[in-house]
Image: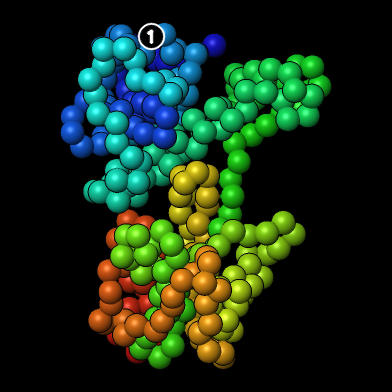
């Protein structure tokens, strides 16, 4: 029933706790044959096939809370890997690998009757044989929006951005029963007290902390003065698009929305 193709080399994401195990100093996925990774053989039932890269299968393996004994690999945070030098294809794969790992970790027991859950063989799901409850990996939609006012953009800092001295676009979870567009208007009003108009879809990006789907929008300022809630958002301001503070890199959708706004301003559109 296991996912490993033992005939050919694959790419391996090996997770320990919330970190990625890598043979060198810097975080990386590992290209190897199954027989070259003997320390994984006890975890064969934990292997999940997550996709393909350069015509080779990609796998995620969860070794749990402790690295296999005697293995002197380094444990790196996913965030450092993602904010390093990843392209979008690899970003999507690592997002999927991590999200499936979290899914299997957190769905060992049935949420309905408390029995043990079992992995379904033909799809990524867990199933309870007692009450037939079935679970699929969770995806949590979040909106993220770049707001333009003439040649300026609204950027904000929450507690985590403040720690990294970074300014970013506004983002927030979509609530139950809400459309994406409603979520954009509500989040902006709640977080910074302004109204926006001309909301346009930009694009989306899976973001594995832990299972978000970031849905990006561009918007124009309409009315209101900036007023932050002091909790989710500590400070927000308008910045000249050609004189920006430290912002997220273009690998993230926040960075791409900022670049797109810069393009709009500089093309006078
Ligand atoms: Zn059950």
Give coordinates of residue 67: x percent, y percent.
34, 20
Q: Please state if 85 lies on the left or on the right of 157 as rendered.
A: left
> From this viewpoint, which residue is outermost toward the left?
25
Mark 1: C-beta under 8 Å from nearest atom of ligand 1: no
Q: Is residue 53 above or below residue 246?
A: above
Q: Residue at x 46, y 79 (%)?
A: 147
SS class, disc 1: helix
Q: Nearer the viewer, residue 74 or 13?
A: 74
Q: Is residue 240 visible?
A: yes
Q: Relative to 8, does residue 219 appear above or below in the rendering?
A: below
Picture layout, residue 43 above or below residue 142? above
Residue hosting label 1: 41
| Residue drawn at x 26%, y 16% as measured from the top left | 71
Specify whether 69 is left or right of 170.
left
Q: Position of residue 99 (x, y in %)?
A: 50, 37
Q: Quadrant of the C terminus?
A: bottom left
**Residue 208 image position (x, y, % from top left):** 46, 45
The quarter of the picture where the N terminus appears is top right
Color style of the picture: rainbow
């Amino acid at each position: 029933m296991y996912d490993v193709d033992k005939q050919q080399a694959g790419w391996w994401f090996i997770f320990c706790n919330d970190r990625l195990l890598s043979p060198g100093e810097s975080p990386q996925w590992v290209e190897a044959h199954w027989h070259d990774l003997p320390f994984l053989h006890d975890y064969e039932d934990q292997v999940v096939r997550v996709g393909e890269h350069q015509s080779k299968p990609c796998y995620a393996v969860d070794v749990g809370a402790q690295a296999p004994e005697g293995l002197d690999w380094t444990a790196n945070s996913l965030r450092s890997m993602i904010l390093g030098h990843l392209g979008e294809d690899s970003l999507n794969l690592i997002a999927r690998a991590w999200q499936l790992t979290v899914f299997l970790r957190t769905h060992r027991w049935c949420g309905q009757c408390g029995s043990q859950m079992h992995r379904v063989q033909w799809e990524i799901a867990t199933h309870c044989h007692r009450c037939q409850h079935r679970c699929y990996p969770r995806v949590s939609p979040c909106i993220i929006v770049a707001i333009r006012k003439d040649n300026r953009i609204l950027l904000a800092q929450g507690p985590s951005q403040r720690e990294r001295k970074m300014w970013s676009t506004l983002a927030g979870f979509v609530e139950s029963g809400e459309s994406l567009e409603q979520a954009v208007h509500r989040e902006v009003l709640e977080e910074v007290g302004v109204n926006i108009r001309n909301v346009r879809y930009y694009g989306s990006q899976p973001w594995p902390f832990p299972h978000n789907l970031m849905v990006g929008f561009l918007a124009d300022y309409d009315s209101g003065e900036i007023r932050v809630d002091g909790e989710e958002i500590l400070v927000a301001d308008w910045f000249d698009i050609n004189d920006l503070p430290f912002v997220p890199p273009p690998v993230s959708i926040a960075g791409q929305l900022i670049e797109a706004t810069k393009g709009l301003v500089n093309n006078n559109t």
